[in-house]
Image: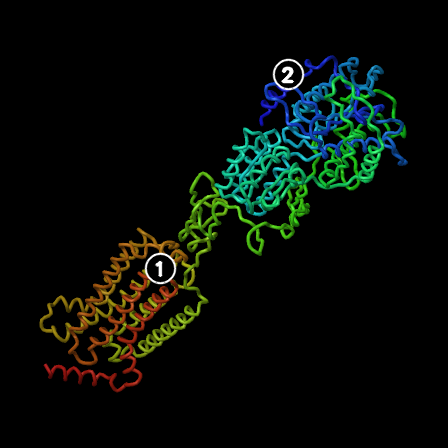
Amino acid sequence: MSVQTHVVKTLKEFNKSWLMLQLADGELNYVSQGQEMQLQGDFIIAGLFPLHYTDGSSADMPALDPCNKGRNNKHGFHLLQAMRFAVEEINNSTRPKSLLPGVKLGYQLYDICSVPASILVTLDLLQQHHNTSTPATEGDTNTNYNNSQRAVAVIGPDSSSKSFTPAALLGAYLIPQISYEASNEQLSNKYLYPAFFRTIPSDKNQVAAMIQLLVRFNWTWIALLGSDNDYGLDGMQSLSKLAPQHGICIAYQGVIPTFTKDTIQTMRNMVESILKTKVNTIVLFSSKSKLSGFFPFVIERNVTEKVWIGTEDWSVATLISGIPGIHTIGTVLGMSVKYASISGFQEFERKIVEASMKHNNTQEVSNGNDCLQSTDLYTLARNNFSLENYDITSSFNVYKAVYAVAHALHQTLSCDSGQCQRRSVYPWQLLSWLKQVRFSLGNTSVYFDMNGDPPTGYDIVTWVWRGKDWSLRLVGSFNPDPITLTIDADQIEWHTSGASRSLPLSICSPPCPKGHKKLLTGQHKCCFDCQECPTATFLNTSDPTTCQPCLPEQWAPPSSEQCLNRTVLLLAWDDPLSIALLFFLAACLLMTSSTAIIFLLNLNTPVAKSAGGRTCLLMLAALTAAAMSSLCHFGQPSPLACLIKNPLFIFSFTVCLACITVRSLQVVCIFKFASKLPPAYDKWAKKHGPEFTIFLVSVIMLLISVVRVAINPPQPSQDLDFYKDSIVLECNNTLSPGATLEIAYVSLLSILCFSFSYMGKDLPANYNEAKCVTFSLMVYMISWISFFTLYLISRNPFTIAAQVFAILFSVLAFLGGYFLPKIYIIVLKPQMNTTAHFQNCIQMYTMSK
C-alpha cells in the first residue's frame, strides 16, 4: 500500500470520526465509568485493548456499536491486565533503586473492539490535550499543563488496521504511541507516523522469515492468501514482491473477505482455486478474526495433507485451533513472537479472579457516552479465562511498552539522582527520550531502531495434535540481522500419506537432472520441461534456462554443469613412446655415421667408386640430416621447429634421391647407350655435370621450400576443431599449396630414380641397384602413405610418433637398400672389392650381350 493511499485513508477515517463525534450527546465522557478502567496518577498512560469482538457497523452508517454488546475477547483481557500489572509493579517497586521514585503512574484503559472505536478513543485523547493551555516550548515548565488528566503516551492498539489513523493523528501532536501487536510495515514510515513505536517485530521481518522457510524446504509452488485488511493486504503484497527473487512462484493469490452471507460462495471458490493449482503449500497472511471465517470452508471441502504457513497473529491463536475439524487440514507451520514470561503475572491474574468473585456489582454505569470505558473488568474476570502461551507472549509486549514509557519518564524527570523532579512533561519531550531507551527485562533487551521497531525475530512453531488435543511445538527461530533461519525439521510431524511421513513437496515441475536446461512452459518460471545441454556447453546455475558454450580451451560432455580443460596432445619428451623413438633415432644416426666412416676409409676401392664415390658421403650426410629433422616433432612446437622440420627433411631427402638418380643415369648410359651418346654427354660427365645436376635439383627444392616458408610461414598453433575434448599442438600451414608442390617435386624425382634404376636391372651385379632402390622407394612410399592416412583420421601423440617413425624408416630404407650391400662387400667380402673382380663382371656382361 503506497504512502498516498495511507494519507487518503487517514483523511477519510478522520472525517468519519468527527461525524461520529457530532452524533454524540454533549462532550465526550473520558472519566471512567467502568470498574478498574482508570487509575489516577501523576502521569497517565492510555491503554487501547480489544476486550470484545463485534461484527462491525453497517456500511451505510459510520456509527459505533457499543463494545460491551459484543462477545468477550479473552486475549484482549490478558493484554489489559498486563498493562495494569506493569503499572502497579512500577508504582509499588521495592527495589533499592526505584524506576520512578516519588512518582506514581496512572492509566486510562479503553475497549477498542473495532476501527471506529480506536478512532473515537484517539479523538478523546486529543480533546484532553486541547483542553489544556498552549503547549510549552522546550525547557518551559508550564504548571497549567496537568499530566494527571491527560495521557503522556498511548499503549496500543492491537492491530495494524486499528493503528493507522490513531498513529497519524497522535503523530501530528507528537504523542508517543507504542503498539504491542500492530506489525504492518507501513507503520515504520516516520514521515507519516513520527511518534509510532512497537514492541512486536515489523511484518518486514515476518515476510523475510516466511520466505526463508519456503526456501529451506524448497517449496516453490505456493498459494498466497491475505485477509481483507491492511495487515493482510500489505503483507501479501510484500511477500509477492520478494518471492520471485528467491525462485518462488505464486500459483494463486486470493483475498479473504469478512465472513458474511454474501462472501460464502467467494470463499468456496477460493478453496476450489487452491485445489486446481495443485499446490501443497499455502501461505496465509491473515488476521485471526478474518481467517476464522475461512477455515470452515477448507474443512468442508475436505482439504487435507497441505502445509499451511501462518503469521504470528493466527498460528498460535486458540480462535483458529479451536475450529471444529481443523486438525484434518494438514501441517501448520507458523511465526510466533519470541516467548518470554512475566514473573508474577499469573499470580496477579489469579488474584483478580478471586477479587471479582467477592466483588458485588452494584455500581451503575453512567448513561452518558458509554462507548469508551464502560466495560466492567470484574464481570470479565469472573470468566476465569485461560492464559495460553500466545496470551503470555503478547502480554509481554504490553509489559515492555509500559516499561519503555517508564524509562523514558525516568530520563525526562532526571530520576538518576534518586528522586524524580516534580514538573510537567509534554508528550514531545517524552518522545525524544523514548527513542533512546535501552534496558533489559529478564533476558530480553528492549530498544527501538530508527524506525521505532524492535530488532527482534520470531520463533517457528508447528501444530501438534494428539487426537483432538492441540499444542504448539517450537521447531526453530528466525533472526533478521543478519537474516538467519534455524529449524529442526525432525521435530515437525508432517501430515503426509504413508508411514514415512516424509517432507511434502510443493513444486510445479520436478528439478531437471544435472546439465539439463529449463524450457519454460508458461508464465511461471517454476513450470518447465528439461532439455539436455549438448556437447561443449554447460549449464550455469545462475541461468538455468540457457546452455552456455565453453571457452575454446575447454570442453564438456553432454549434460554438464561445468567445463573441463581439454587434454593437450603432443609427443612429450618423457613419454615412453618418445624414449623408444629416440633410441631408434640414435641407432639410425649410429648406422649412418658408421657407414660414412667405412666409406671414407674405403673411398678409393671399386665398391665405393661404383656406388658413387664422394657422392655417397653427400648422401649419408643428407640421410643424417633427414633423421635429425625428426627431433623437431618432440615436445611443444616452437617457431623454429615449425620453420625447419619439413623443409629440412624434404631437402635432405631430395639431395639423397638426386644422387641416386644421377648415379643410376650414368650407369645406364655407360652400359647401354655408350655408342649412342652425343659428345655433350662426355663434356657433361667430365666437367662435373653430375655434381652440377645434383646441385641444381637440390637448389630447386630448396627454393620451393624457402618461398613456401616465406609466403606462408608455419607457426605453432592449437587445433581446437579436430577433437572436441582435446587440443592438438601442431604447426599450421603444413598442407599449404607450397607443401603440395614440394611433395609433387619429390614424387617426380622418385619416379625418375625408380625408372633409371629399373632400366639397369640387367647390368652387372656390382652396378645393378634396381632391386635395392625399388625396395627402398617402396618402403619410403608405404611409410608416408600410412602416415598421411593416419593423419587424416587421428591427431593424437601416436600420429606424431608415426610421422617420426616414417622419417626414420625412410632413412633406414635407403641406408639398408643402397648402402648395406656395399658395406657387406667391403667388410665381409673384401675379395669382391678388387679391380679384377669388377673387370671380370664387366666382361661377362659384355659376352652375354
Q: Which image quarter holds the N terminus?
A: top right
User: Is residue 695 depicted above or below 305 in this figure?
Assistant: below
Disc assigned to residue 798? none
Snapshot quadrant of residue 716 = bottom left
Which one is in front, 283 or 326? 326
Rendering coords of residue 824 (x, y %) = 29, 82
User: Is residue 681 depicted above or below 505 in this figure?
Assistant: below
- Give the residue pinned by disc 2: 15
Which one is in front, 244 or 794? 244
In front: mark 1 or mark 2?
2
Residue visible at 76% across and 23% down in the picture: 373
Snapshot quadrant of residue 598 = bottom left
Whether residue 419 sits left or right of residue 453 in the image: it is right
Rendering coords of residue 705 (x, y %) = 29, 57
User: How is the protein colored in the picture?
Assistant: rainbow
Q: Which image quarter holds the C terminus?
A: bottom left
Q: Count how many numbered circles sit on residues in the image.
A: 2
- Mark 1 and mark 2 lie on one chain; the one further toward the N terminus is 2
Q: Is residue 94 in sight in this rendering?
A: yes
- Give the residue pinned by disc 1: 644
